[in-house]
Image (cartoon, rainbow, N blue to C red):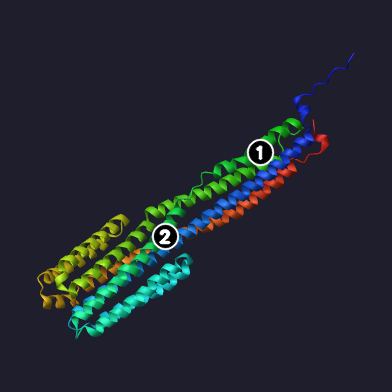
Amino acid sequence: MSAPVAVRTPRQRMATPRLLRLLRFGIVLSMLLAAAASAWALNHGATDMATIARGTDQVQRLQVIRGNILRADGLATNGLAQASEPAAQRESYRALLDEAARLTVVASDAQPLDQAGLAEANAGLVRYAATIELARTVYPTNATSALARVDEAQATLRDQVLPALDRLDADNQGRVDAARSTGRSGWPFVATVPIAVALLALVLVAMRTRRLVNIGLALALVAGLGLWQVTDSALGRATTAVDAAHSGPFRTAMATSHAYAAASDAKSSEGRLTLQTSAAAAGNARWRERVARARSALAEGAGPADLSAKLDAYEAAYGVLQRASAAKRSGDVARLAGDASAAGVNPTFAAFADASRAVADAAGAETARTMSERQDALGLGVAFAVLLGLAGAIAGAMGANLRLEEYR
């Protein structure tokens, strides 16, 4: 007669020491992996903050470079239209180009990816400045040749300098948008793994031992919960800060920078209008299209109301000049182009340009400060995440390492 076959109970199918070894391995592995994932997510968020701040600064620089060049072009052609260009006006022209050149170097250092495009823009700017100087030289004796040189200089801006700056602007806007849209949808799932493993270990160990609550495993559970809270809270605050900046100071900085560049483009058209009254109709159409673009940017950015008022003042001054140009009253055009009163085209434009740049700079600085604060907070979160992960792994390993006499 054969001996009866022994039937093992579910508890007997896996010995307690083996179960504890598996639990210990699972807790340590899940805690370390969660800590690594948390550190990566937080560090990635900090990188995004830096990208947004750097991109904001770079877009502003590019718009100032563009605006300065076009503003300088407007002053150059405006000066040629006058009987005698004021020394202060020529100095303003040079100062604008000098600042554009300086900012080109700063932008190249700040973003290595933009160096090729900036080099192309700078080469065109050098060619433009040389051509304008040639136009200044020949204008008193040969106006036709001077106008040809002005056309050549402006073609250099239109065909080389401005397209290069536009491409760089789009590239940097794309980097900022990509950093802003980075999600954290996968993080909650990763964070729950060590919590679930620690909770499962607590239940199973309580079933297999004389202890109802295992201190080590309980501490591992608390560490897992803390890891989840630290990471989720830090990422949540960073997302909120980015969204708030995008609808506030970042939006204002970008819009007013673009408004400055668009209005400077109008100033360039105005300068050409003063120089050649026969092109009044085409120049006026271009001027109004650029000013409409500046107004649209101001409305989008929700900037201060006084910026629109300053643009209105410039438009009123331009209207007087444009009517004289349309009537081909060259003497009046020269007089109005050089009007240094508060109602002149140069003073009213300078008031708008300087104010819009000040608003953009302040909004950009606020955006950079907010991103820097969030970046620092995320960096601190990385340290906490690593410490909590290590603490949870150590506590879990110790909790699952019980003495044999404690088994049931």
User: Residue 295 location in percent, x, y?
Assistant: 25, 59
Say if 20 sits above or below 167 in the image: above
Dot 2 or dot 1, earlier in sequence: 2
Asked if the residue under mark 1 is in contact with the one under mark 2, i.e. CB atoms within 8 Å, the reply is no
Rendered-image quadrant of the C terminus: top right
- State which quadrant residue 345 falls in: bottom left
Q: Would residue 207 appear left or right of 320 to someone viewing this image? A: right
Residue at image point 22% right, 61% down: 289
Label 2 sits on a secondary structure element that is helix
Q: Nearer the viewer, mark 2 or mark 1?
A: 2
Q: x and y percent of residue 357 in the render?
A: 33, 67
Q: Tell me where residue 380 sits by quadrant.
A: bottom right
Judging by the rendered image, the residue that carries numbered circle 1 is: 197
Q: Nearer the viewer, residue 197 or 61?
A: 61
Q: Amino acid at mark 1?
A: Val
The residue identified by callout 2 is 171
- Whether residue 240 sits left or right of residue 73 in the image: it is right
Seen at 55% across and 45% down, the residue is: 187
Q: Position of residue 137 (x, y in %)?
A: 25, 85
Task: Tell me if residue 305 can be seen.
Answer: no
Label 2 – label 1 distance at C-alpha:
45 Å
Residue name at image x 14 percent, y 78 percent: 335
**What amino acid is at disc 2?**
Asp
Horizontally, residue 119 falls left or right of residue 9, namely left
